[in-house]
Every structure is written in structure tokens, then in C-alpha cells.
């Protein structure tokens, strides 16, 4: 997994207003006193570390003169308070995967995306030639992240990052991102006043964290400035460069919706169980609607993905699917991008197999199943009450060994049987 994936998970598509943010814990100290501590932290703690990283006094002054904390941000832990306790999992249902795929939203994004793919066709062809990433994938991420650059980014990124570096649940991470933002200012890539982002500190049309900007952003329009806020070529080129650097395989798709015969176990999914596409096809797995797998893919490795087990769409995905996950570490995000890209490029529609009515169980019930599987020797991945691929395939294996039809997904009928 990319070291930047945690940053993407925080930043991706969370362009929300302050009114929707989580409440701040009750303060143990008054705000003026905390503001004074913040100023001392900038002077005594942050500034020396920033100077050691090559940040000048001039940049520090430009960034922090008049700076105050943003008290409206989520996940803040002011001095003298404790982080909020994790929500009781017995009171939380995990969501059905189908809830992620709003058909209305996908249709709207696809219609706009097709128009913009045409408008920027020449630029996208140059981007694909340079980085090997298809234009429709780049446009899909652009649409999902910032509404094709139209999403409002009202926050001062420096203030957000400084606030979170001083008093949040992920102080160390945001401190690193703050110093990366200061490096951007030092280099002249942006100034503190115009560096706008989301409430998580993600920047510009690609929604890059500052460390991602330093690593991946490119001046694709060759005007001498890398501007992911106002230059569409720079934003699109930077997205493609990100994917290329994370391992995008030129000439391969993201994946294919398929039909998996009942005689083929659904407990074969996961990036660690890759096989050549021809091997999957040899098991009787076929693309939906009678389409053939691309000839160039037959000898290349691919993986099974069944995000709802036997209760929803089934896929054979390429390594490029997992590259998309480096942008946002979520199977559903990567499927959303893949489906949106197919709609943009090929006028495709929704996945043909509907999502089943799953996701109604309490997380505590799934957590109990995971613990039971672990005691039986299964590797379920993270024991968190959410059915990831290791949990799904472990459940499918257990079902098969106990004479049950493998569904590879938790349901209420298994609660009493799996103990």
C-alpha cells in the first residue's frame, strides 16, 4: 500500500461545510488560553522543525502572521481534553455496498464527464501518451474528487493543517503535511493566502494532500507553474502522474464485471490470489453480456472481486484496480471510478447484477463472526466488524467445509451457526 493512501482516505470527496462537521468535545480550557498555547507551539515547536526542513523565516511569517485556530473542524482534541470514544459497534450497521452507487449521481457525472472528455480530448491524449493512463480514468477521478473542479474549497489549507497538527486525533500526520505545505510556499508553488483546500487539507482539483503535491503534481501545460487549482491540464496530468508512479500498467483496463458459476468458489478473491485471465476464463467465468476478455489480457494476471459475495455484482479486476485504490483505499471507490470511466468512454450503464439487500447486520454481529473465524484458524484481516475480502473469503471457506452453499458474505442466518 502506498504511504499516501491514508491521506487519500481522509481527503477523498469530503468537501463538506462546517455545518455538517462533527461536534467539538467539551473544552477543558477556554479558547483564548488554547489560542495562546497554539502561538507558543508555532514559535517553540513547529518553527524550528520547519527551519530544519529548509523553510525560511520569511515563509513562516507569511504563513502564520495573524493565524488563529479553526474551531469548526472535526476530530479536534484541544489541550486538556481526550479523544472521543469510538462509537459502540453494537449500535452501528455497516452499509450495503449498493448504497455507494447512486445511479442519479453516476449518470450526472458521466454526462458531464463525456462533455469534458471531448473538450479536453487533445490534452487527455497527450496525458495518456505520457503516462499510459486512459483519459476516462483521469476524468472519472477528477469528477469524483472535485466535481470536475467545481467543488467549493473554502478553507485555508495552512490554517486547517496547523489546527490539526496542533490538536487533532492525527497530529503527527498533519504536522508532516503542514511542513509539506510550507515547502510549497517556500518553492513559490502557492502562497499561503491562495492555498485553498478541503476541511482535511486536500488541495485543488485532484484533492492532493501537500505531500502528494510535492511527489506527483506536474506542470502539464508548460506555463512554468504547477497549478492544480486553476489549470485543468495540470490537474489532469497530475492525477495521471500519480497513478503512473503508483504502478499503472499501460494498455490494461481496470477490470470487468463477470458471471461466476456456482461451481466456482467465491472464496478465491483478493490481490494475493491472482491468476492469468485465461485461468479464470478456463473455470467458466465469463464477462457480462457475452463480451470476450481482451486478447492482450489473457496471459496477464487478474484477481476475483466479490464485494457483496454472491449477493451482488462480481468482477475480475486487473492490478490497475489496486492502483486506483492507492488514490483512495476503498474497493467501492475503485469500482465507482471504473464504472464511471466506462460510462464516460463507452456509454456504459450500471453494473448488470443488482446489489443484494445486505448490510443490515450490526457491526458487533460481524465482529463476533470474525472472532469466531479467527479461533478456527482463519485470517480475516482487520477485526473491525466490516466484511473485507479476507473476511468474505474466510466465511466462504468455512461455509463450504460445513456443508453450506458459500455466499462469502455475513448474514443473520449464520450468527448462531458460527460460534
Image: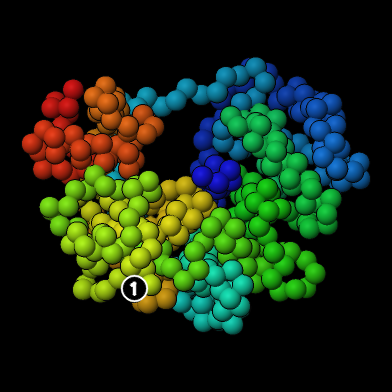
Q: Is residue 323 left or right of residue 50?
A: left
What x and y, as percent, mark residue 255? Answer: 36, 63
For the point 20% across and 38% down, which residue is it? 397
Q: Nearer the viewer, residue 187 or 90?
A: 187
What x and y, as percent, mark residue 242? Answer: 59, 58
Judge whether residue 92 can be spotted in this image: no
| Label total for image | 1
For the point 64% across and 36% down, which residue is it? 173
What x and y, as percent, mark residue 68? Answer: 76, 36
Q: What's the image's color scheme? A: rainbow
Q: Residues within 10 Å of mark 1 (few under 14, many from 20)?
A: few
Q: Secondary structure at mark 1?
A: loop
Judge whether residue 362 can be spotted in this image: yes
Q: Nearer the viewer, residue 239 or 73?
A: 239
What x and y, as percent, mark residue 145? Answer: 53, 58
For the point 38% across and 63% down, which residue is it? 300
Give the quadrant of the C terminus: top left
Residue lying at the far left in this picture: please name it: 403
Q: Which residue is mark 1?
A: 294
For the point 56% across and 36% down, which residue is it? 74
Q: Is residue 44 left or right of residue 396?
A: right
417 is higher (above) or lower (below) than 155: above
Q: Nearer the viewer, residue 244 or 359?
A: 244
402 is higher (above) or lower (below) than 139: above
Q: Is residue 407 left or right of residue 77?
A: left
Amino acid at each position: 500500500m502506498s504511504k499516501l493512501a491514508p491521506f487519500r482516505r481522509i481527503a477523498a470527496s469530503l468537501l463538506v461545510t462546517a455545518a455538517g462537521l462533527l461536534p467539538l468535545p467539551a473544552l477543558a480550557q477556554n479558547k483564548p488560553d488554547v489560542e495562546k498555547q497554539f502561538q507558543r507551539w508555532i514559535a517553540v515547536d513547529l518553527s524550528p522543525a520547519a527551519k530544519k526542513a529548509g523553510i525560511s523565516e520569511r515563509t513562516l511569517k507569511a504563513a502564520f502572521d495573524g493565524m488563529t485556530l479553526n474551531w469548526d473542524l472535526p476530530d479536534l482534541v484541544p489541550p486538556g481534553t481526550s479523544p472521543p470514544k469510538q462509537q459502540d459497534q453494537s449500535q452501528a450497521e455497516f452499509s450495503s455496498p449498493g448504497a455507494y452507487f447512486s445511479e442519479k449521481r453516476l449518470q450526472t457525472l458521466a454526462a458531464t464527464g463525456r462533455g469534458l472528455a471531448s473538450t479536453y480530448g487533445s490534452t487527455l491524449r497527450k496525458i495518456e501518451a505520457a503516462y499510459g493512463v486512459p483519459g476516462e480514468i483521469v476524468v472519472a477521478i477528477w469528477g469524483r474528487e472535485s466535481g470536475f473542479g467545481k467543488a467549493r474549497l473554502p478553507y485555508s489549507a495552512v490554517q486547517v493543517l496547523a489546527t490539526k497538527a496542533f490538536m487533532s486525533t492525527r497530529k503527527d500526520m498533519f504536522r508532516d503535511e503542514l511542513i509539506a505545505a510550507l515547502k510549497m510556499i517556500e518553492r513559490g508553488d502557492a502562497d499561503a493566502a491562495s492555498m485553498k483546500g478541503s476541511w482535511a487539507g486536500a488541495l485543488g482539483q485532484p484533492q492532493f494532500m501537500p505531500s502528494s503535491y510535492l511527489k506527483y503534481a506536474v506542470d502539464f501545460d508548460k506555463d512554468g507553474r504547477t497549478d492544480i487549482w486553476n489549470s485543468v491540464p495540470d490537474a489532469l496530468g497530475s492525477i495521471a502522474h500519480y497513478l503512473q508512479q503508483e504502478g499503472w500498467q499501460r494498455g490494461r483496463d481496470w477490470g470487468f464485471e463477470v458471471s461466476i458459476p456456482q461451481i466456482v468458489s467465491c472464496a478465491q478473491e483478493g490481490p494475493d490470489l491472482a491468476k492469468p485471465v485465461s485461468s479464470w476464463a478456463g473455470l467458466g467465468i465469463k464477462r457480462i453480456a457475452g463480451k470476450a476478455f481482451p486478447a492482450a489480457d489473457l496471459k496477464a494476471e487478474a484477481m476475483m472481486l466479490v464485494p457483496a459475495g454472491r449477493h451482488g455484482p462480481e468482477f475480475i479486476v486487473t492490478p490497475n484496480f489496486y492502483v486506483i485504490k492507492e488514490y483512495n483505499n476503498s474497493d467501492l471507490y475503485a469500482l465507482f471510478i471504473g464504472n464511471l470511466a466506462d460510462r464516460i468512454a463507452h456509454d456504459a450503464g450500471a453494473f448488470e447484477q443488482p446489489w443484494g439487500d445486505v448490510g443490515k447486520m450490526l457491526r458487533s454481529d460481524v465482529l463476533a463472526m470474525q472472532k469466531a473465524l479467527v479461533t478456527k484458524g482463519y485470517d480475516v484481516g482487520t477485526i473491525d466488524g466490516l466484511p473485507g475480502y479476507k473476511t468474505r473469503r474466510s466465511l466462504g471457506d468455512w461455509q463450504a467445509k460445513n456443508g453450506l452453499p458459500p455466499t462469502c458474505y455475513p448474514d443473520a442466518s449464520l450468527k448462531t451457526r458460527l460460534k
